[in-house]
Image: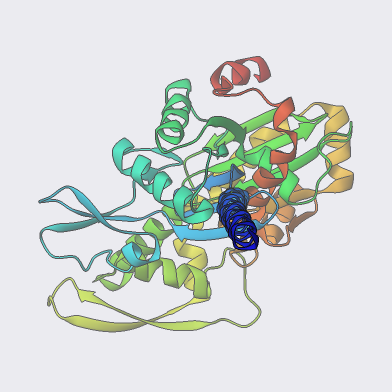
């Protein structure tokens, strides 16, 4: 009898131990499941859900601004393509280094000309590449704001919007370059006081008078950095009978480019190909020669500035006389450009701080007010008729 009771107690203890073991295993399994869920949600939390980004889609350079981070990308608008397989090989700086140096099956192209899209498919892939580099892996597609020249047509405007959507943008917003440049330069365009901006980019020069948050008078001409390079190439060919490439002309422009007398002239040695002998030739060019070389495109920009001033309402013109003209864009960095504008117009002119990135910064700052902006095209061609 005592033996039977011992066996029963041992059985009940074993069952309790088994139940305890099962409950421990259940707790362990539930713990693993809960830790797995926590791991999934932590990974999901670490994943970037969506971002607002601003793109300065320039003819020469593309700048990408990510909301909350600032400018994260600055690359040349150049794409290298394998013409046999129709495949993109390099984008940006690496592609720019191939300009004028590629073999027969590779071509380095600039898909944007005069501020607008000239090769749609290549531009689409370039935008897609830059969006991925700037944003990485995202759960949702980003909202994208792109700045466009004020002289763009409705068809060109639609092409920019479609390219951004196909490149992965959820919503696309467009902003005029002079408006973005003014915001990036720190001007208060929402006040009743008028401000005038001259933005000299790679493909276009945009001149505008702004007040009360909008553009009152504007003009866009397809004369800017690219035309400066062409003028330098033409000058060297005409005077020295030497051929130089685009990259050499651009380097000359950045090193000694000037539109006003320099107190101390600078000199640079340039290598090119002699047109008469067909052999390499070394020549020396001064900054004073750059004034002569750049005279024609500079004069056309000055004429456009004067035309905008002539069309400006008198009340706003008084504000501009007090506040002066602000210049932005890479072309404004040519030595003495602000002094030349001051001399021609009689209005004090200054170059904005960080002139090259003003448009991108202004586009990025406008991302904070997406709820106030219309999505898609903004019919600039129709607005220009109203302004005129």
Query: Residue 127 versus residue 211: which sits nearer the camera?
Result: 127
Report the quarter where the C terminus lies: top right
Residue drawn where x is 83% and y is 35% of the image: 194
Query: Residue 27 versus residue 248: which sits nearer the camera?
Result: 27
Q: Is residue 364 left or right of residue 315?
A: left
Q: Is residue 19 visible?
A: yes
Q: How is the image coloured?
A: rainbow
Q: Residue furthest front?
A: 1
Q: Residue 296, percent across and down?
A: 47, 52
Q: Is residue 349 left or right of residue 97?
A: right
Report the quarter where the N terminus lies: bottom right
Q: Residue 42, percent across and down?
A: 62, 53
Q: Looking at the image, is 148 positioned above or below residue 200?
A: above
Query: Residue 191 versus residue 282: which sits nearer the camera?
Result: 191
Query: Residue 23 versus residue 61: which sits nearer the camera?
Result: 23
Q: Looking at the image, is 331 positioned above or below residue 142?
A: below
Task: Write down the quadrant of residue 147 in the picture.
Answer: top right
Residue drawn where x is 62% and y is 83% of the image: 264
Q: Is residue 360 left or right of residue 184?
A: left
Q: Is residue 287 left or right of residue 366?
A: left
Q: Looking at the image, is 327 positioned above or below residue 144?
A: below
Task: Write down the quadrant of residue 231 in the picture.
Answer: bottom left
Q: Is residue 311 visible?
A: no
Residue drawn where x is 84% and y is 34% of the image: 190
Residue drawn where x is 38% and y is 48% of the image: 126
Report the number of discs.
0
Q: Residue 310, percent across and down?
A: 71, 31
Q: Residue 137, percent across and down?
A: 49, 51
């Amino acid at each position: 009898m005592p033996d039977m009771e011992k066996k029963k107690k041992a059985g009940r203890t074993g069952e309790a131990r088994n139940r305890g073991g099962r409950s421990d295993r259940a707790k362990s399994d539930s713990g693993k499941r809960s830790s797995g869920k926590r791991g999934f949600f932590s990974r999901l939390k670490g994943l970037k859900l969506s971002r607002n980004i601003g793109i300065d889609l320039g003819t020469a350079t593309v700048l990408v601004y990510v909301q909350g981070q600032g400018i994260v990308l600055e690359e040349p608008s150049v794409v290298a393509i394998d013409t046999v397989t129709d495949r993109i090989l390099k984008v940006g700086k690496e592609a720019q280094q191939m300009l004028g140096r590629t073999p027969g099956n590779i071509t380095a192209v600039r898909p944007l000309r005069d501020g607008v899209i000239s090769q749609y498919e290549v531009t689409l892939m370039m935008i897609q590449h830059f969006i991925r580099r700037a944003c990485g892996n995202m759960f949702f597609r980003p909202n994208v704001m792109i700045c466009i020249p004020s002289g763009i047509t409705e068809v060109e405007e639609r092409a920019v919007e479609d390219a951004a959507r196909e490149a992965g943008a959820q919503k696309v917003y467009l902003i005029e370059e002079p408006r973005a440049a003014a915001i990036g330069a720190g001007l208060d365009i929402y006040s009743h006081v008028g401000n005038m901006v001259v933005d000299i980019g790679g493909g276009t020069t945009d001149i505008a008078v702004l007040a009360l948050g909008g553009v009152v008078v504007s003009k866009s001409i397809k004369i800017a950095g690219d035309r400066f390079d062409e003028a330098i190439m033409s000058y060297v060919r005409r005077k020295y009978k030497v051929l130089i490439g685009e990259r050499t002309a651009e380097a000359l422009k950045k090193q000694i480019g000037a539109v006003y007398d320099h107190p101390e002239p600078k000199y640079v040695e340039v290598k090119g190909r002699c047109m008469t002998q067909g052999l390499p030739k070394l020549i020396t060019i001064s900054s004073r020669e750059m004034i002569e070389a750049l005279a024609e495109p500079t004069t056309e920009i000055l004429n456009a500035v004067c035309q905008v001033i002539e069309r400006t309402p008198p009340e706003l013109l008084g504000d501009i006389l007090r506040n002066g003209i602000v210049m932005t864009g890479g072309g404004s960095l040519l030595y003495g450009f602000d002094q030349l504008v001051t001399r021609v117009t009689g209005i004090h002119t200054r170059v904005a701080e960080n002139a090259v990135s003003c448009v991108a910064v202004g586009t990025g700052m406008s991302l904070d007010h997406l709820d106030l902006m219309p999505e898609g095209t903004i019919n600039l061609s129709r607005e220009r008729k109203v302004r005129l």
